[in-house]
Image (tube, grey):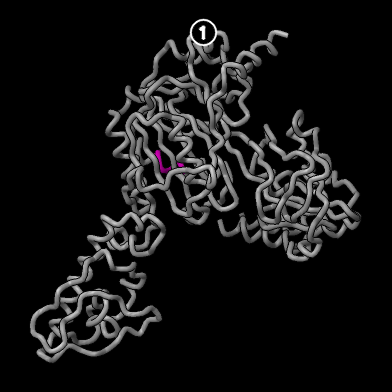
Amino acid sequence: LVTTASRPSSRRCTCSRPPLPSHAPAPGRRFLARRPSFRHFPACHHILSITAAACCTDSCSLPTLLQVKYDLYGVRSCVINALAYLAQGKENPNWNSGSDSKMLIPQTKNIGLPLMNLMRFKGLPILQQLHIEEQLLRTSSENWCIVNDGTNDPTIVMGVSGKPAELLEIESVLDDQVPVIRRFTGGGTVIVDHGTVFVTFICNKEAVPNLQPYPRPIMSWSSSLYSKVFQGIGDFHLRENDYVFGNHKFGGNAQSITKNRWIHHTSFLWDFNVQNMSYLKHPKRAPAYRSARSHLDFICRMKDYMPRSTFMDKTVEATETQFSLRPIQLEAIRTCSEAEFCPSSRFLTNEELEAAAVALQS
Amino acid sequence: MALRMWASSTANALKISCSSKPNVSLAFSLSRCFSTVLDGLKYANSHEWVKHEGPVATIGITDHAQDHLGEVVFVELPEPGGAVSQGKGFGAVESVKATSDINSPISGEVVEVNSKLSETPGLINSSPYEDGWMIKVKPSSPSELESLMGPKEYTKFCEEEDASH
């Protein structure tokens, strides 16, 4: 970087966007003019690509270091403007809308990796999680990872085509008023509670290079990611769409695939209540490796293999090898309104469960 | 992989040349690992097919799609009388652990739905172009068919898609 003592350059930005109302040295003055409020800064989409020769003295971009000599006052303006953008990025909720400018920080950390938003929850109700997931799948164009550390109340969650009469001990479920949800993804039935850890990936179909957006390739990709998490632990592998240690299942998977995006979510049995398993029947469609074993002989607890926080941290680390992660708070997502999107995951009513029980008996 | 691609191309070429009548059911297949592409149909890049016969067009998913999806266990279809739009979802299939959207290759009004699929969703796997048809539609814009792929174009599309992954 070479500086001269010359007066501020009058060169203008050569990109198609108009110059930004940013900080600039006051003409004819040797000290910096007052910086305008950063709330007036619009998003800058060319901050990484523009040359200093074009924008240094009267716009917001950081100079390209190897090009052109800069005026000292112009350099100071650029630095102040860049700092203003970084500050804006942390405060301005509009940066969640898809503007390129919000990528400034992640791009400089992990240049070349696709961006993925990371949301972490603890005890988020499972229905709320499912609603958020379906909304993001259907209405967002970004990649997302959601980690929910447990859910509040024990809840039965069936796949999209699940039949209560075939899958549940309905009388017990009704007697004990266990909530039952039909979710929007495929797959089987689980009962989840505070001992369940949920991890979800929602991706554009181009997000993972060379990955065809079909069930088996997505399942295979996910298992390779978790292989990094469980490396050397417990003989982890993917077996007929389940995550197992040996031949004991500890993670169940489900997916939904749209034209251009897909979701893959997993419920991990970090711990479970033995009593809760009694609400579930032995399913008609079971993987061959289950070999007709009862629930308790078929599943195992992840707590016997890995601490809970270690699992979640390692999962995030493994994800970071393929994506540039950006933490996002729930408030940053626009809330669902009936006019925009209505999720399909819902509680089954007592009437529906009772009707299913009656139909089974008849 | 290269041998499979060559064999697939050869098999598809043979099938196209001998399947000139759209109503001929294609019972022959060298191997289930080859995807069948029928002559006389039009194809969408989301792997649905459409057969236009007079005022009605029949829609389903291709052999390539059912092969990649796996065993279909559940099908969700619209009601007759509903509208479908080109490129937009009209239903879904569940296979193994996944629901996958089915997108309509053309716009129009649903006039008939294959009710057999509720009891026997596996027809989509065993007979994707015949018994596994999904909906019949009265097209609202017949010109939309011209934007779809023909058999040879679709075969090449599938080969390129498989080769790039």
Taken as a whole, is the magenta stretch helix, strand or loop?
A: helix
Q: Is residue B69 above or below residue A244?
A: below
Magenta span: A222-226
Query: Circle 1 — which element?
Result: helix
* Residue A231 in sight here: no
Residue at point 76%, 51% (across, down): B36
Image quadrant occupied by the N terminus of chain A: bottom left
| Quarter of image, res B133 | top right
Where is residue A273? Give x, y as percent.
39, 15
Q: Is residue A152 above or below residue A312?
A: above
Residue at point 56%, 36% (across, down): A344
Residue at point 61%, 54% (across, down): B1
| Quarter of image, res B68 | top right
Residue A136 appears left or right of A121:
right
Where is residue A145? Give x, y as percent.
40, 44
Disc 1 marks a residue whose amino acid type is: Asp
Residue B11 located within the stretch drawn in magenta:
no
Where is residue B15? Give x, y as percent.
82, 55
* Residue A119 in sight here: yes
Q: Mark 1 lies on which chain?
A: A
Image quadrant occupied by the C terminus of chain A: top right
| Quarter of image, res B77 | top right
Residue at point 26%, 55% (across, down): A91
Q: Is residue A15 above or below residue B79?
A: below
Where is residue A156? Give x, y as percent.
49, 21
Label 1 Cα crowd, 10 Å radius (few <14 / some 14-19 / many 20+): few
Residue A264 appears left or right of A304:
right
State how many labels appear: 1
Residue topped by disc 1: A175
Residue B1 appears left or right of A232:
right
Q: Which of B116 and A355 is in front in this view?
A: A355
